[in-house]
């Protein structure tokens, strides 16, 4: 029993170490890892070396560590990569070609509505697309992103009641954090089939998104575009986004187990 608890402890420490990395901190030293995990430096150093040997971390000539190719290889086996992203990409490319805007697919991450977020699993962009904060593997709030609001609109009222127990933070001065207003926007999104955000995540950006009809064994997902406020033609973009959502679902159904 003691061995079991010890093994669980090692796994927990290793997970905390791997989660110490971020888009802003791709490379960390053993000292950095010790500080971020609260582990003793000798423990962090020993665990980092072991993770490197397993391919979970890569150790570089300067002694710093990055996420390893072995971890990436395992991650690519996840259904959101092998099924959702691969089946969605052709339709995302068509949506990009029709709009010239950034195209995202995000999934609902987290079973607890009070901590759930939009996890971005696919992205298509080009030379004329507007810069965005999103990246593959990145997370953003549900209430300030187009894909996030589309995911909220797909949830039941009981789920939303729990969601609204959380404190909603502003990302910009335009972020909607009032429960009554956000519920009204969710209801509107359900009625018309797509959700929008206007400068709620990034100033000057508008997002239009639609939920992808559910597929067995995949988390709730949504597809959306992000455009500049000056060219946010909702009447043109919304039908394109909704068509992409339906087409992605059809492609997923064709390979359903």
Image: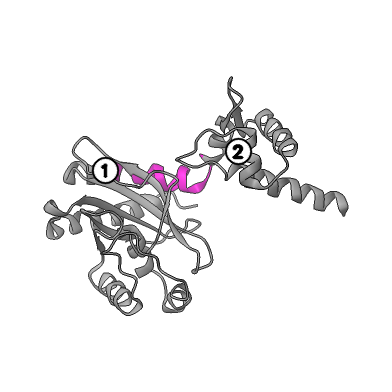
On the image, which quarter does residue 167 sit in?
bottom left
| Secondary element type, mark 1 | loop
Report the side of 138 relative to 180 (left or right). Answer: right
Residue stretch rendered in magenta on the structure: 76-93
Q: Earlier in the sequence, mark 1 or mark 2?
A: 2
On the image, which quarter does residue 57 sit in?
top right
Q: Is residue 173 above or below residue 129?
A: below
Say whether residue 83 is magenta: yes
Q: Quadrant of the N terminus?
A: bottom right
Q: Is residue 207 above or below residue 98?
A: below
Distance between the alpha carbons at the discs numbered 1 and 2: 30 Å
Report x, y in % for residue 111.
53, 64
Circle 1 is placed at which residue position?
A: 131
Residue that appears at 50% across and 48% down: 79
For the image shown, how many numbered marks are present on the structure? 2
Report x, y in % for residue 112.
53, 67
Q: Nearer the viewer, mark 1 or mark 2?
A: 2
Report the side of 126 relative to 167 (left or right). Answer: left
Report x, y in % for residue 199.
24, 58
Front residue of 122/207: it is: 207
Dot 2 surroundings within 10 Å: few (below 14), some, or many (20 or more)?
some
Circle 2 is placed at which residue position?
A: 32
| Secondary element type, mark 2 | helix
Colour convention: one colour
Say whether residue 185 is magenta: no
Residue that appears at 15% across and 55% down: 232
Residue that appears at 32% across and 73% down: 182
Front residue of 57/79: it is: 57
Report x, y in % for residue 130.
22, 44
Residue that appears at 47% across and 58% down: 219
What kind of secondary structure does the magenta stretch mostly adopt? helix
């Amino acid at each position: 029993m003691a061995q079991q608890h010890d093994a669980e402890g090692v796994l927990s420490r290793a997970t905390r170490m791997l989660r110490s990395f971020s888009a802003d901190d791709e490379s960390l030293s053993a000292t950095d890892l010790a500080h971020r995990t609260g582990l003793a430096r000798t423990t962090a150093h020993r665990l980092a070396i072991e993770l490197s040997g397993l391919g979970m971390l890569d150790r570089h000539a300067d002694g710093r560590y990055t996420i390893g190719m072995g971890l990436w290889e395992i991650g690519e086996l996840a259904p959101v990569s092998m099924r959702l992203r691969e089946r969605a990409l052709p339709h995302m490319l068509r949506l990009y070609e029709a709009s010239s805007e950034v195209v995202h697919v995000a999934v609902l991450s987290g079973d607890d509505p009070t901590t759930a977020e939009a996890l971005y699993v696919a992205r298509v962009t080009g030379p004329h697309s507007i810069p965005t904060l999103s990246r593959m593997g990145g997370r953003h709030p549900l209430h300030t992103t187009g894909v996030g609001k589309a995911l909220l609109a797909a949830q039941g009222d009981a789920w939303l009641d729990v969601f609204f127990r959380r404190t909603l933070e502003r990302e910009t001065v335009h972020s909607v954090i009032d429960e009554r207003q956000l519920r009204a926007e969710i209801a509107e999104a359900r009625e018309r089939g797509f959700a929008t955000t206007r400068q709620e995540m990034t100033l000057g950006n508008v997002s239009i998104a639609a939920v992808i009809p559910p597929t067995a064994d995949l988390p709730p997902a949504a597809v959306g575009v992000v455009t500049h406020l000056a060219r946010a033609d909702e009447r043109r973009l919304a039908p394109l986004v909704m068509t992409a959502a339906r087409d992605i679902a059809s492609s997923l159904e064709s390979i359903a187990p």
